[in-house]
Amino acid sequence: MTVTTSPNLQALQQILQDRYSCRAYRPEPLPRELINTMLQVAQRTASWCNTQPWQVHIISGEARNRLSEALYAAAEVDPIGAGEFPFPTQYINQYRERRRTCGFQLYEAVGIERGDRAASRIQMLENFRFFGAPHTALLFTPTDIGTYGAVDVGAYVTNFMNAATALGVGTIAQASVSGFPQIVKEHLGVGDDQMLVCGISFGWPDPEHPINSFRTERAEVNDVVHWHE
């Protein structure tokens, strides 16, 4: 067996190829057993000194609806908010182009013309409806651990989404909700000893919705890897 014919590697490659940011969902909730399976897989995430700093709050049903309504109302006034981790100050060069391309693909999929700010704003606010997903996970890290904890949470997010993909579940990681940490904390009963990193909305994907039709591209390995020998 060669490296490229390893069944484990092939399975991982297929999961990574299949995963995408799902922005339209069927309304029916997932079985609790299925969600627990995803959580068990993600719990194997590597972390700094094995601290496992993530705290995960999953909202569904009325709890989900109440938080969605509060976030949507706040985002209508200020769509960015003020998160506990600062957002990027700017995107330049290839990072800006990749971001723009993703945005254009999204808007094209749902028929929003370039420059239509009103329609773009309506689509942006769907973040706070959790794109119709029946479940959303809100991820926190201890305030004292700070950035190191946020990095570990990022690894957890990846593994959670890959586990979901392996089970046919759609996901989307959402930085948008982290702009409103006090609203989220009040709804979940979380204190200031925890910092909100991001959310992950998830559920059965709606394959018929056009917004789920596009896929983002990835840079070539040689564009991001630098060898030193």
Image: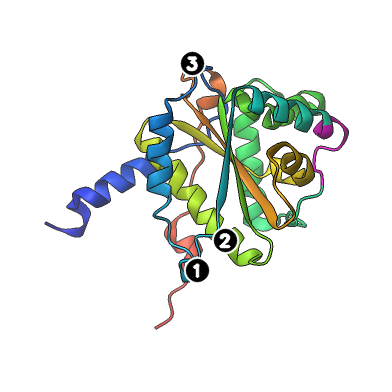
First in sequence, mark 1 or 2: give its number.
1
Q: Are dots 3 and 2 in contact, CB under 8 Å?
A: no
Of all residues, the one furthest to the right in this rendering is: 77
The crowding category of the residue bearing disc 1, from other C-alpha atoms within 10 Å (few below 14, some 14 to 19, many at least 20), is few
Nearest the camera: 14 or 51?
51
On the rendered image, what quadrant is the C terminus found in?
A: bottom left
Q: Decide if residue 172 is in sight here.
A: yes
Q: Which residue shows up at 65% across the image and 22% down it? A: 62
Q: Is residue 168 magenta?
A: no
State the image coordinates of residue 39 (x, y, percent, origin top left): 43, 43
Residue under circle 2? 151
The crowding category of the residue bearing disc 2, from other C-alpha atoms within 10 Å (few below 14, some 14 to 19, many at least 20), is some
Residue under circle 3? 208
Q: Amino acid at mark 2?
A: Val
Numbered range of the magenta stretch: 74-81
Q: Are dots 1 and 2 in contact, CB under 8 Å?
A: yes
Residue under circle 1? 48
